[in-house]
Image (cartoon, helix red, strand yellow):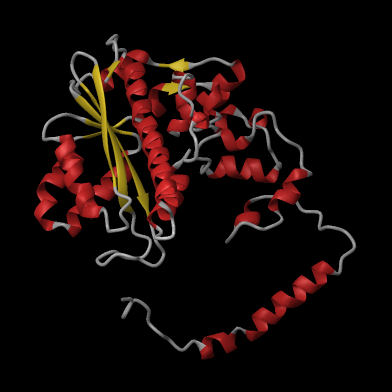
């Protein structure tokens, strides 16, 4: 039941108070439509504030395309840099002075233009040396419903329905396990219990962008008080590979991004998300899950989705194993079982 989920409020007075504002919007739109030529204005931040304009693709298609877009410069928040880009209409980072760039942006610019890889192997290995094998490599998949379908959950809450885990022994033996619930019931409790059983109590748990997994685990701990202590203990064992990659590795193929899908082709070109059938990213995983739990989905399609989800999530965690192998400098031979 959804009793109490929504609250009715009378906004008549507020609506009438904005009648002139809305009338002005309509007049401006009519005036724009009446013009014989398109407005001469470049695309920019205004095209996505507060929401992306439906004509952005059309307008940007007629603009020059940069060989090295400024969008490849990560975290462009420095005021002097933003002002330079906007006031001069800069689209290529070759036209951005080095003194306006921070260390990471300068690294992207320098190594992209030179076509050379940056890799501080000793520093990366030092960051990982304290985390001894055996180790577990974990990735979660979640779904967030605008209108919750399970009791005890709230709108847009990240509900975990799947995880993949690669377990690496001291001798290089690599096994894969996981959890996936397509029953249509709330998977949260079973997910938490399976995660605890898989991760045990001691080994480091490698993830990529730990803030996500940490937030999901904390939310589970808040919901299931009996599991709170062991779940919170997991958060203390998380080891994030993302900051190690950001600090110590950059390949021109990344185009300014350190997402695992950007880093992986540079380190393990034999692994490719494009080779997967069906599910290839997190948003597709959520959509596939929603389709799978729909009662109208037949058994054959549901099992097909199961296979797609398992292969996708398994690739995520195996990718982390390969990144760990590169960053740690380990000469261990992986033996998949």
Determine the image quadrant of residue 323: top left
What is the quadrant of the N terminus in the image?
A: bottom left
Determine the image quadrant of residue 115: top right
The x, y position of residue 243, in whole percent, is: 35, 31
Q: Residue at horizontal 16%, vertical 29%?
A: 203
How many marks the image carries: the answer is: 0
The x, y position of residue 68, in whole percent, is: 65, 29
Determine the image quadrant of residue 156: bottom left
In the rendered image, the vertical position of residue 331 relative to residue 238, given as above or below: above
Horizontal arrangement in the rendering, residue 244 relative to residue 265 (left or right)? left
The residue at the far top in this view is 331
Front residue of 1/76: it is 1
The x, y position of residue 38, in whole percent, is: 83, 57
What is the quadrant of the C terminus in the image?
A: top left
In the rendered image, the vertical position of residue 265 relative to residue 54, given as above or below: above
> From this viewpoint, is residue 244 visible?
no
The x, y position of residue 103, in whole percent, is: 47, 28
Front residue of 85/151: it is 151
In the rendered image, the vertical position of residue 326 relative to residue 279, given as above or below: above
Front residue of 124/263: it is 263
Horizontal arrangement in the rendering, residue 19 relative to residue 248 (left or right)? right
The residue at the far right in this view is 36
Front residue of 188/257: it is 188
Q: Residue at horizontal 29%, vertical 43%?
A: 213
């Amino acid at each position: 039941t959804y009793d109490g989920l929504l609250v009715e409020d009378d906004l008549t007075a507020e609506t009438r108070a904005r009648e002139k504002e809305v009338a002005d919007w309509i007049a401006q739109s009519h005036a724009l439509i009446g013009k014989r030529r398109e407005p001469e204005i470049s695309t920019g931040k205004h095209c996505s504030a507060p929401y992306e304009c439906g004509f952005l693709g059309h307008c940007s298609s007629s603009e020059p395309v940069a060989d090295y877009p400024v969008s490849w410069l990560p975290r462009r928040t420095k005021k002097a840099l933003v002002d330079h880009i906007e006031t001069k209409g800069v689209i290529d980072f070759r036209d951005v002075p080095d003194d306006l760039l921070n260390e990471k942006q300068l690294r992207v610019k320098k190594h992209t233009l030179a076509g050379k890889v940056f890799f501080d192997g000793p520093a990366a290995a030092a960051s990982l040396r304290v985390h001894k094998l055996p180790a577990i490599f974990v990735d979660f998949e979640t779904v967030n419903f605008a209108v919750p379908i399970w009791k005890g959950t709230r709108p847009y809450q990240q509900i975990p329905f799947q995880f993949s885990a690669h377990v690496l022994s001291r001798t290089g033996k690599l096994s894969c396990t996981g959890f996936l619930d397509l029953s249509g019931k709330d998977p949260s409790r079973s997910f938490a219990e399976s995660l605890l059983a898989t991760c045990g109590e001691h080994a480091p748990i490698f993830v990529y962008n730990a803030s996500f997994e940490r937030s999901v685990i904390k939310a589970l701990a808040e919901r299931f008080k009996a599991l709170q202590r062991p779940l919170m203990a997991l958060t203390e064992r998380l080891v994030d590979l993302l900051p190690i990659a950001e600090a110590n590795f950059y390949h021109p193929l990344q185009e300014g991004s350190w997402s695992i899908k950007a880093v992986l082709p540079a380190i393990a070109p034999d692994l490719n998300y494009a080779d997967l059938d069906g599910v290839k990213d997190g948003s597709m995983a959520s959509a596939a899950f929603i389709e799978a739990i729909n009662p109208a989905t037949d058994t054959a399609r549901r099992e097909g989705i199961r296979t797609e989800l398992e292969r996708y999530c398994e690739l995520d965690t195996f990718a982390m194993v390969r990144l760990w192998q590169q960053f740690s400098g380990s000469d261990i031979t992986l033996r998949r079982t």
